[in-house]
Image (cartoon, helix red, strand yellow):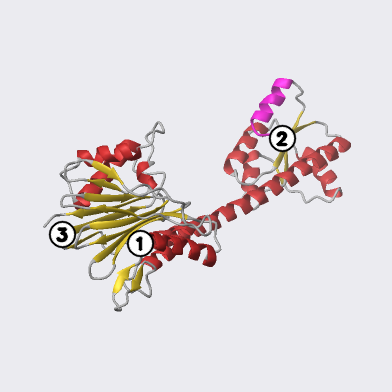
């Protein structure tokens, strides 16, 4: 596009450009040029600086403002040669200058230079468009994934069949709170024959979808009260369902994970078997935080030996610990998301901190106690967004 109030100057410049194979449109004022641009932006604009109604600088500013998404290489035609004038032109949005009268060789050189810049600018624009399209696709994909994760979170929460369950003088309360949509923690219980209950806490390494899928598979090993479907149950000589020794269950789980699952994931676990008639508990640990007993008199005991996490090493053996629960006692099984919860300075809550919370709420029970633990944990961390999954199983001996 050639913009000049002098018809002769327009003809001279247009003739040269046409001979070199360019398509040229003309305008005698900046206003007329802006109207022409509505039909299509030119690749290059040659505009006289001094024109009536609208100067070349004003036209350049107006062009850049009206069509910000389409770039034209703008060359001012001027007899001005002062540095201040050139700086003023560049600040107005001009790309280059040509002094009048225009020299043909210099004009071709400026067009060649402008062509290179336009080519780079269009390549950059194409890449930006490609990036923008890709970002739109990713947003659509992430929206779909987020919706799937919300459903996955509901499904994972459904692995905890009932938040609270009472049988005889015992009450079980449990909660699962993932640091993301889904996580690798799980707590639960299962009937283990007419006089036993199984209790467990699991913490799979890592976070997110892979850990959640692994947790769901592990839940399948422990979720049924049928001996043929639950790895922790067996039939005795009389055909009655009875619990397997807890240390044997952990060893069998370790062998099964290493033999059947091609994964780098592993998990820690606490498994307890309670005799509901006597209150005696058998417990075995595989790297899980020590379960904690808060006795009726307020004293605390830590249970179990550390043990090696399941899925790391073959042929592992695990120890069994026996202890007695009496009326008023409560057993707390948590993941390390509780005891290793950091405060804003990075200090971990640890077992002592959990004991302080339990002591502070010694007269609170059931789900109210679990909610109180979570509330105090948020206060300790200074946020309700924990860095790790949190799971709690509370087992209370209510007494006769």
How crowded pointer 1 is (Cα within 10 Å; few <14, some 14-19, many 20+) is rated as few
Number of the front mark, 2 or 1: 1
Q: Is residue 251 visible?
A: yes
Number of the front mark, 3 or 1: 3
Q: Quadrant of the C terminus?
A: bottom left
Q: What's the CA distance linking mark 3 and mark 1? A: 31 Å
Return the residue nearer the eye: 45 or 109.
Answer: 109
- Residue 169's label in the rendered image is 3
Please say if the residues under marks 2 and 3 sit with CB atoms less than 8 Å apart.
no
Return the residue nearer the eye: 130 or 278.
Answer: 278
Q: Is residue 1 visible?
A: no
Q: Is residue 396 left or right of residue 95?
A: left
Return the residue nearer the eye: 44 or 168.
Answer: 168
Is residue 69 rendered magenta in the image? no
Q: Disc 2 designates what residue?
A: 95
Q: Quadrant of residue 44?
A: top right
Q: Disc 1 designates what residue?
A: 154
What x and y, as percent, mark residue 95?
A: 71, 35
Q: What's the CA distance linking mark 2 and mark 3? A: 86 Å
Q: Is residue 26 above or below residue 167?
A: above
Q: Is residue 223 left or right of residue 331?
A: right
Q: Which element type, helix, strand or loop, lies under badge 2?
A: loop
- Residue 37's label in the rendered image is none
Q: Is residue 396 left or right of residue 151?
A: left
What x and y, as percent, mark residue 248?
A: 41, 62
Please say if the residues under marks 3 and 1 sit with CB atoms less than 8 Å apart.
no
**Stretch in magenta:** 83-94
Residue at figure coordinates x 80%, y 39% from the top left: 113
């Amino acid at each position: 596009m050639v913009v000049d109030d002098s018809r002769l100057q327009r003809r001279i410049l247009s003739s040269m450009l046409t001979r070199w194979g360019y398509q040229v449109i003309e305008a005698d004022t900046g206003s007329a040029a802006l109207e022409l641009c509505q039909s299509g932006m030119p690749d290059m604009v040659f505009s006289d600086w001094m024109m009536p109604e609208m100067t070349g600088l004003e036209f350049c500013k107006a062009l850049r403002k009206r069509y910000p998404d389409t770039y034209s290489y703008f060359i001012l035609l001027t007899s001005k040669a002062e540095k201040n004038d050139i700086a003023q032109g560049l600040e107005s949005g001009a790309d280059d200058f040509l002094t009048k009268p225009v020299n043909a060789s210099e004009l071709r050189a400026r067009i060649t230079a402008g062509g290179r810049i336009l080519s780079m600018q269009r390549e950059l624009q194409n890449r930006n468009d490609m990036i923008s399209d890709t970002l739109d696709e990713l947003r659509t994909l992430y929206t779909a994934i987020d919706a799937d994760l919300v459903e996955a979170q509901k499904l994972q929460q459904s692995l905890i069949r009932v938040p609270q369950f009472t049988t005889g003088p015992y009450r079980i309360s449990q909660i699962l709170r993932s640091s993301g949509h889904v996580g690798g923690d799980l707590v639960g219980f299962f009937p283990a024959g007419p006089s036993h209950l199984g209790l467990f806490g699991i913490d799979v390494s890592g976070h997110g979808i892979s850990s959640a899928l692994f947790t769901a598979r592990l839940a399948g090993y422990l979720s049924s009260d049928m001996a043929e479907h639950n790895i922790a149950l067996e039939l005795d000589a009389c055909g009655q369902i009875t619990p397997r020794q807890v240390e044997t269950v952990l060893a069998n789980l370790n062998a099964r994970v290493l033999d059947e699952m091609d994964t780098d994931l592993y998990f820690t676990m606490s498994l307890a078997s309670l005799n509901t008639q006597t209150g005696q508990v058998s417990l075995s640990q595989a790297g899980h935080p020590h379960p904690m007993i808060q006795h009726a008199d307020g004293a605390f005991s830590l249970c179990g030996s550390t043990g090696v996490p399941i899925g790391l090493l073959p042929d592992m053996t695990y120890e069994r610990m026996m202890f007695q629960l009496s009326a008023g006692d409560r057993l707390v099984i948590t993941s390390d998301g509780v005891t290793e919860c950091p405060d804003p300075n990075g200090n971990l809550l640890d077992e002592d901190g959990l004991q302080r919370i339990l002591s502070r709420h010694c007269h609170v029970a059931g789900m109210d106690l679990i909610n109180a633990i979570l509330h105090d944990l948020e206060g300790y961390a200074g946020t309700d967004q924990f860095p790790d999954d949190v799971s709690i199983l509370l087992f209370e001996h209510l007494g006769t």
